[in-house]
Amino acid sequence: MSEQSITAKHWGILIFLAIIWGASFVLIREGLVAMTWVQVACMRVIVAAMSFVPVVWYYRKLFTKKLVAPLLAMGFFGNTLPAFLFPLAQTQISSVVAGVLNSLAPLFTFLLGALFFGIAWRWLKFSGVVVGLLGAVVVIVFGQELGDTNTSNAAYAAFAVLATVSYGVSANVIKTYLQDVNPFFASGLALLMMLPGVLCVIAGTDIQAAISHPQFLRSLAAITFLGVASTVFANVLFVRLVQMTSALFGTFVAYLIPIVAIILGLLTGDPFKWGLLAGTALIASGVWMSRRD
């Protein structure tokens, strides 16, 4: 779809997604108060998958065998893997840094699309990837210099970056193989396919220790909201947005997520350094360059 085809409706959905997803990093931080990063990830996927059961049942006649592979890819790369990687990263980096690094998603969407999904290669686009990655390095360096225990281990930022690579794979799969599939059905079944594995993983954790934590209910509420709003509702909107526009426009939401994440992070006590804005600007410039023809 051309840039001229992007309407106010598409931008409205994009901004709404940015608000929901921008808040997700603060919600993950709250979940980590009483739960391990593995439990946070599992609970997010479990809540989201169970919420989709009636939807998938309603649309069950849409299922065909050819959907299995792309839906598995969508469920794993678009939901499950990032659900584990971001909490793991946020055991050592702040929600602000995680939110800013999330904006790398469009760069990897283009790079993976050009390498494996037939997106036209342009040197300006590739230059955008380089600029964006440079911005990520700046963000990680300034995040490390904050001197806060939550941001002192820059190596953990790599997990957040890997999550954006995963999002790039999912966005291209959706556009290439699931373009005409009902977004409610696709989102729901993709998550439900992940449910057996996730249930096995959480069963191997010390659930009793989490339940015994004095802040358990607060953490559970945060992850429940994260699962329903940020994963279920927002995921359906994102799939529909990519179908209506393009994989690159869909991940353009990453421009706006850092703004929301920074504001909410500051309001809820996360540390911040002005140098982070330089890295954010570089990433945004890289994303802009990667979207040029």
Image (spheres, grey):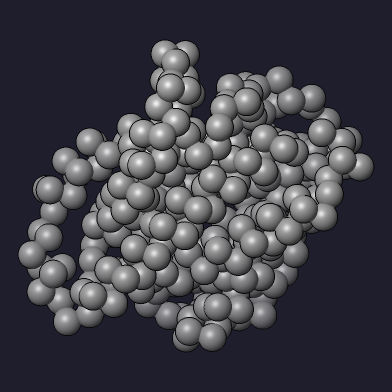
Q: Relative to 154, is 53 on the left or the right?
A: left
Q: Say if 226 sits above or below 48 in the image.
A: below
- Which residue corresponds to the image point at 34% horizontal and 64% vertical from the top-left? 223
Q: Relative to 161, is 87 on the left or the right?
A: left
Q: Say if 157 sits above or below 198 in the image.
A: below
Q: Say if 55 sits above or below 119 in the image.
A: below
Q: Position of residue 133 (x, y in %)?
A: 65, 50
Q: Say if 245 sits above or below 217 in the image.
A: above
- Which residue corresponds to the image point at 54% horizontal and 45% vertical from the top-left? 236
Quarter of the picture holding the N terminus:
top right
- Which residue corresponds to the image point at 47% horizontal and 60% vertical from the top-left? 229
Residue lying furthest right in this view? 4
Q: Position of residue 242 (x, y in %)?
A: 66, 39
Q: Position of residue 146 (x, y in %)?
A: 51, 79
Q: Position of residue 22 (x, y in %)?
A: 56, 65
- Which residue corresponds to the image point at 21% horizontal and 74% vertical from the top-left? 216
Quarter of the picture holding the C terminus:
top right
Q: Quadrant of residue 152?
A: bottom left
Q: Does residue 227 appear in the picture of this structure? A: yes
Q: Quadrant of residue 182?
A: top right
Q: Relative to 162, is 123 on the left or the right?
A: right
Residue lying furthest front in this view? 58
